Amino acid sequence: MNELLEVKACKYGRGIFATRNIRKGELIHEAPVIISPSEEYKHLKKTVFIEYVFWWGENLEECALALGYGSLFNHSYTPNALYKLNLTQKTIDFFAHSDIREGEEIMINYNGDPTDDTPVWFDIL
């Protein structure tokens, strides 16, 4: 699927790992999305998929499930990657926030901003 990335077992169950060195600022992955309209949120939150969606839209009023590797990146308050919503292309684009070494797990901050330390909805291991 992507020569930069592979899925491997890790302490979180599974994670996304670099298969080569990646430079800061480099595009890591473009994940197409399936958008769930806001009126469907009440149904979505009753499923396991709610753990894998991103807030989506101009005002973050919808949810989007990222395909490819997009919904499999693990969370960190000190991430080495970040993501940007590409509303025009309907993708979530992942970029290296710092240099990433081959074999290193690629992690994002689920809060969107790499420096946001707001607690997330699950316990951090």
Image: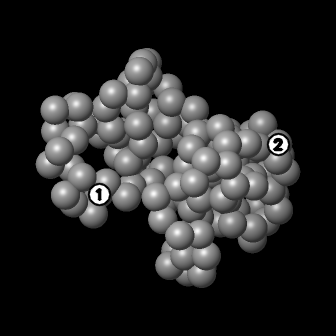
Residue 79 drawn at (x, y percent): 72, 53
Count of numbered labels shown in the rendering: 2
Is 90 left, or right, of 99 in this rendering?
Answer: left
Q: Is mark 1 on a helix, strand or loop?
A: helix
- Residue shown at 40%/28% (left/top)? 60
Q: Is residue 43 above or below residue 104?
A: above
In three-dimensional space, the C-alpha distance between marks 1 and 2, rounded to whole angstroms, equals: 30 Å
Q: Nearer the viewer, residue 125 or 72?
A: 125
Q: Which amino acid does label 2 sit on?
A: Lys
Q: Specify the quadrant that holds the C terminus.
A: bottom right
For disc 2, the marked residue is 24
User: Between disc 1 and disc 2, whose residue precedes?
Assistant: 2
Q: Can residue 51 be seen in this view?
A: yes
Res 29 visible? no
Label 1, on which residue? 49
Disc number for residue 109: none
Disc 1 residue type (three-letter): Phe
Picture layout, residue 15 above or below residue 75: below
Q: Quadrant of residue 37?
A: top left
Write down the quadrant of residue 71 in the picture: bottom left
Quarter-of-image position of residue 74: bottom right
Q: Residue at x 24, y 37 (%)?
A: 36
The crowding category of the residue bearing disc 1, from other C-alpha atoms within 10 Å (few below 14, some 14 to 19, many at least 20), is few
Category of crowding for the residue at label 2, using alpha-carbon neighbours closer than 10 angstroms: few (below 14), some (14–19), many (at least 20): some
Residue located 46% across and 58% down the image: 121
> Residue 63 placed where, x, y %?
33, 38
